[in-house]
Amino acid sequence: MDSLPARRPVSVGRGEPVLDVVIPVYNEEKDLESCVLRLHEHLTRTFPYYGFRITIADNASTDTTPLIAARLAATMERVASVRLEQKGRGRALRTVWSQSDAPVLAYMDVDLSTDLNALLPLVAPLMSGHSDLAIGSRLASGSRVVRGRKREFISRAYNLILRGSLAARFSDAQCGFKAIRKDVAERLLPLVEDTGWFFDTEMLVLAERAGLRIHEVPVDWVDDPNSTVHIVRTATDDLKGVWRVGRALGTGRMPLDRLRRPFGDDPRDRELSGVPRGLARQVVGFCVVGVLSTLFYLGLYTLFRLGTGAQVANALALLVSAVANTAANRRLTFGVRGRDRAVRHQAQGLVVFAIGLALTSGSLAVLNAAADDPAHTTELAVLIAANLAATVVRFLLFRSWVFPSEPAGRRAGSETAEGLPPDPDQGLADVDAAEVVEAAEAVVISSETIVVDEDPRTGR
């Protein structure tokens, strides 16, 4: 599948829906009609120049919800109803969003806990082409929230878990108020496995890891005391989802390259005369990974030294840390994702490892020749010095041999002389505070103007 095109303002013909707001429901016969009437009135008043649609997604309700939904769709303009025979909010959203023809897709909970005045700020960045996804946040600065202490604690704890385990940078994963561009949904939704409440979180984590832009809107939110959400079961399912997604990301099984924007869409990718492309970021990333892997190496050396000699302990510690170092640099420093050529990269990394082994082992040999029984602290000091020299050699070999930069033509998205598409696995990764955490994890485990068309036939 091709990568995403560059962001453009939404372009639609007159009368066509720009926005499709989905309301997933399950046994909501008491609140459904009032919700749809209120939302329809708000959209009619605040979206006077743009078409919209409200889609009721009934997932396996057993009360009169399907009848109410069908009646609303039959009697109200721009209201549709979809019936699914299986439960799951994620399943309902995936089904409706995949079938919708609107360029901007959104959803909100039927209780309308979120103030509807945040809807236009939510979708405007997607319509203009500024952002790829947008979320309402109850935890962002400027939000005004009324809810009990129990739900407040659970919400903050869950988002803290996401930050610590998946290095998530968005502030509120589960607020029932989100939007996504249709072109992004077409690429992103097939990668999301969850069909329940974790659907939102998984979608956001994958989007963020792929480098998509997520716009956050502070919202006014009032808790619904009659919510039917089972907190304990939902929390358990969410934690299982965090484990599954974290494991998939850690092993490189997520094909996130297909979600990348083309080179040049990000102003940070612009060429600067006289400055090697990406060198500064690569140096920073390499240094971060290097420091973490060195600490990892020293810890392993100290552990192995308890039961074996210095040379064997050094070789084993350097081998394990080298595999972790190559994996971390592959992902974070040089932006290579997925499994393609992973074995080759590790093999090349082992060659670099051999050079490092020669430097450190040689240093130990010289030390042992100069002193019969050197102190452990002296051994560590010599190994640190030797590893610094090996680090410089390792960076040069990684940049020029193991993970070489692509030619300029291929970076711009052109095809090669043989007619093959550019390799999606190459690219650069920004290194920031959140990715320092990601680097540590890698080392340890293996290291947003709507354009309304005048002529709907031409789209111009």
Image (tube, grey):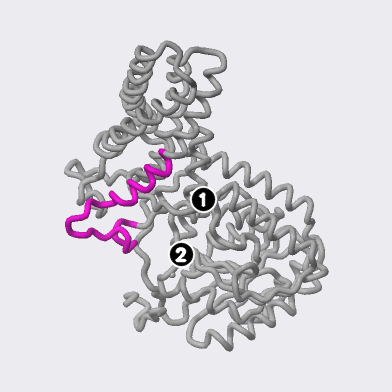
Q: Which residue is mark 2?
A: 132
* Depicted 310 relative to depicted 436: above or below: above
Residue at 40% x, 71% y is: 129
Q: Position of residue 80 (x, y in %)?
A: 62, 72
For badge 1, the amino acid type reads Pro
Describe the element under mark 1 as helix, strand or loop. Answer: helix
Please indicate whether residue 401 sits to the left or right of residue 174 in the image: left
Q: Are marks 1 and 2 in contact (CB under 8 Å)?
A: no
For marks 1 and 2, the one nearer the N-term is 2
Magenta span includes 272: yes
Residue drawn at 59 percent across, 47 percent down = 165
Residue 190 - label: 1
Task: Give the answer, above or below, for where 315 lies relative to 397.
Answer: above
The segment highlighted magenta reads 262-290
Q: Quadrant of residue 314?
A: top left
Say the numbered circle drawn on residue 75: none
x and y percent of residue 169 in the render?
54, 58
Quadrant where the C terminus sits is bottom left
